[in-house]
């Protein structure tokens, strides 16, 4: 059986997903993700604080608050996107 619980309801997890207690169709096949109670294609988008954003930097996209940045070229410091200028930032480990 492919049955799981979603809140007080059951659903077929191969064809649906449970997003915060709401059953949604798995419309993006195995790339279906939840962002609050909405579904999205996580291969093309990213969920930043409950808001679906485009992965403008492909798979190197990350969230900084509600903004999208590339972790290869930038870091998120106190909810601000800052360019990497000195390689590994050791000061953040202190």
Image: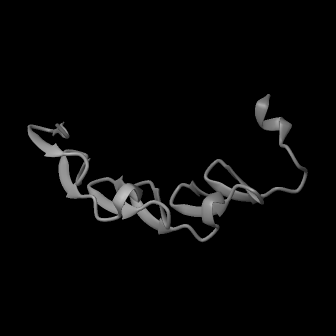
Q: Residue at x 61, y 52 (%)?
A: 79
Q: Residue at x 16, y 37 (%)?
A: 1
Find the residue positioned furthest to the top: 94
Find the residue positioned furthest to the front: 1
Q: Is residue 32 above or below residue 9?
A: below
User: 39 left or right of 62?
Assistant: left
Find the residue positioned furthest to the left: 8
Q: Whole-percent x and y of residue 30?
A: 38, 55
Q: Residue at x 35, y 60 (%)?
A: 29
Q: Quadrant of residue 24 in the image?
A: bottom left
- Which quadrant of the figure contains the C terminus? top right
Q: Residue at x 91, y 51 (%)?
A: 86
Q: Quadrant of residue 57 in the image?
A: bottom right
Q: Is residue 94 above or below residue 38?
A: above
User: 78 left or right of 33?
Assistant: right
Give the number of marks: 0
Q: How is the image coloured?
A: one colour
Q: Whole-percent x and y of residue 83?
A: 79, 60
Q: Whole-percent x and y of residue 81?
A: 68, 59
Q: Whole-percent x and y of residue 37?
A: 26, 55
User: 9 left or right of 49?
Assistant: left
Q: Quadrant of residue 7 in the image?
A: top left
User: 39 left or right of 54?
Assistant: left
């Amino acid at each position: 059986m492919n049955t799981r619980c979603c809140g007080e309801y059951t659903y077929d997890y191969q064809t649906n997903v449970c997003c915060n207690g709401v059953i949604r169709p798995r419309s993006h096949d195995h790339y279906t993700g939840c962002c609050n109670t909405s579904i999205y294609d996580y291969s093309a988008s990213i969920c930043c604080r409950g808001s679906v954003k485009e992965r403008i930097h492909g798979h190197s996209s990350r969230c900084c608050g509600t903004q999208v940045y590339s972790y290869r070229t930038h870091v998120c410091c106190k909810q601000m996107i800052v360019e990497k200028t000195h390689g590994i930032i050791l000061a953040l480990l202190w």
